[in-house]
Amino acid sequence: MNNKIQKITANLWFNTEAEEAAKFYTSIFKNSEISQIIRYGKERHEISGKSEGSVMTVEFRLEGQKFVALNGGPQFKFSEAISFIVHCENQEEIDYYWDKLSEGGDEKAQACGWLKDQYGVSWQIVPDDLSEMISGPDSEKSERMMKALLQMKTKLDYNLLKRAYEGEG
């Protein structure tokens, strides 16, 4: 066995939707796959209360990043305290990921490029150079861009952010 283990893997706790969510996410991101599904056996079933043979965990990759989805029960819910950032090259990519991930999600949880998907997982859909614009050497440019960003109630308008940063309109 020469498989190098990823040092840090995100584990997502679902009630019963782990496989469904993994299929949803891998359908959106390129270079993605479901690599393993582990089912509850007799011993795990007795401890967890889950049906023997039902899905316990789903291992999957999104753009090379490994994730594990666990059907652990209704005890825990996702919150905005943790989110996944999707870096996008242009407005077309921002639109694509926003539209796909927000489908069926919580519209009230959308603001400034943040969204909550249909499973309650939070995502930030941002331009690749957002950090550079925020932390750039010219604080006036950064402040103009932040003012524009904070006024966006849903997905980010990359062209508007760039124009604000450059002081154009």
Image (cartoon, rainbow, N blue to C red):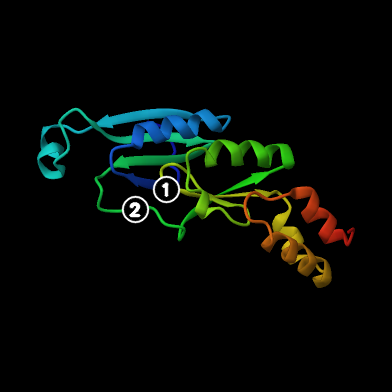
Q: Which mark is residue 77?
A: 2
Rendered-image quadrant of the C terminus:
bottom right
Q: Is residue 129 above or below residue 101?
A: below
User: Left of 114 or right of it: where is 160?
Assistant: right
Local SS, label 2: loop
Q: Nearer the viewer, residue 148 or 86?
A: 148
User: Left of 128 or right of it: where is 48?
Assistant: left
Q: Quadrant of residue 92?
A: top right
Which mark sits nearer the N-terminus, 2 or 1?
2
- Residue drawn at x 53%, y 40% is 101
Residue at the farthest bottom position: 139
Contact (CB < 8 A) between labels 2 and 1?
yes
- Residue drawn at x 77%, y 69% is 143
Give how far across and how far down residue 159 sits, in percent.
Answer: 80, 49
Rendered-image quadrant of the N terminus:
top left
Residue labelled with disc 1? 120
Q: Is residue 114 above or below residue 141?
A: above
Q: Dot 1, how many residues are within 10 Å of its Cα: few (below 14), some (14-19), or many (20+)?
A: some
